[in-house]
Image (tube, rainbow, N blue to C red):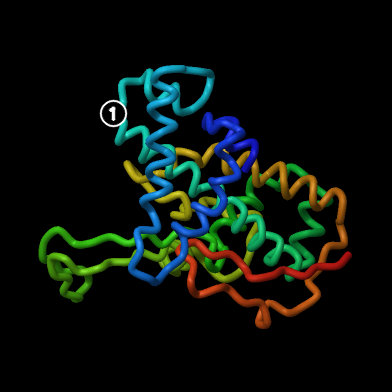
Amino acid sequence: MAVRCELIGIPAEERDELGPLLAAASTLGGDTDRLGPLAALVGRLVALRREEPRDDLISGACAAGLTDAEVADAIAGVIFGGRGVVNHLVFGVEGCAATTSSTAAVTADPGLMPAAVEEMVRTASAGGVIMPHYAREDLDIDGVRIQAGDLVLLDLALANTDRRAFAEPDRIDLGRVPNPHLTYALGRWHCVGAPLARMELRLAFSALLQRFPGLRLVLPVSELSVPDDQLAGGLSALLVTW
């Protein structure tokens, strides 16, 4: 997160505040405005970089002619994406450590790492962010009636296991080509930080497996738990040995 803050343009003195604000904004339940304080922080940063531009993402977005609201949306997405990278790292370790053949293959051939990362983010059971949407008008999708104002939650992890697109979708296949997963969304909604996320995950997994080639889980996958009060929750704990 420190590296991400440096790239975005978040001053060091603001970073201690960022963690608690992200945690609050990701927590489900309650009737308080959990997103407001984070939005206020991002708004202050946009205003600061318009006055004092630097070599960072906020300044670049401002220079590109985006409005304050557009810059804030893009920056918030990258900030939240940092949590997604951490979650995918955890779920990727879970997947690799539970499938020792995958760990051995990537350790023996580092050239497999890009394909391995794509499979890890595709098969992550809860690594994505399920953002709430509300229907603007009545519509029917696959025989289901959605009325204007209805809450719609799109779980990308389900799309990534669609048997029409992926053979044996629950299996980690390092040679899967093509791999049209939707972890980073698609089209205009495609994650602006996807290249950065891919780079971070490749570097993290490479370093981890190089240092601990015998990495394996202490507990079986069936005993791992995911908190149910988080919008983008990872595992509560991941115990490993080597």
| 193 sits to left or right of 188 | right
The residue closer to the viewer here, 4 or 92, is: 4
| 242 sits to left or right of 63 | right
Q: Give the residue at x 57% y 56%.
A: 121
Question: Looking at the picture, which amino acid does disc 1 mark?
Answer: Thr
Residue 170: x %, y % from top left: 57, 71
Q: Kindly indicate the quadrant of the structure image that contains residue 213.
A: bottom right
152, above or below 144, in the image: above
141, above or below 121, in the image: below
Extreme residue toward the bottom, this view = 223
CA neighbours of label 1 inside 10 A, class few (<14), some (14 to 19), many (20+): few
Q: How many marks?
A: 1
Q: Kindly indicate the quadrant of the structure image that contains residue 155.
A: bottom left
Residue 146: x %, y % from top left: 17, 71
| 218 sits to left or right of 204 | right
Q: Give the residue at x 68% y 66%.
A: 95
Quadrant location, the N terminus: top right
Residue 116: x %, y % from top left: 66, 52
163, above or below 45, in the image: below
Q: Which residue is mark 1?
A: 67
Q: Give the residue at x 40% y 58%.
A: 34
Residue 242: x %, y % from top left: 88, 64
120, above or below 75, in the image: below
Helix, strand or loop status at disc 1: loop
Q: Give the residue at x 37% y 37%.
A: 72
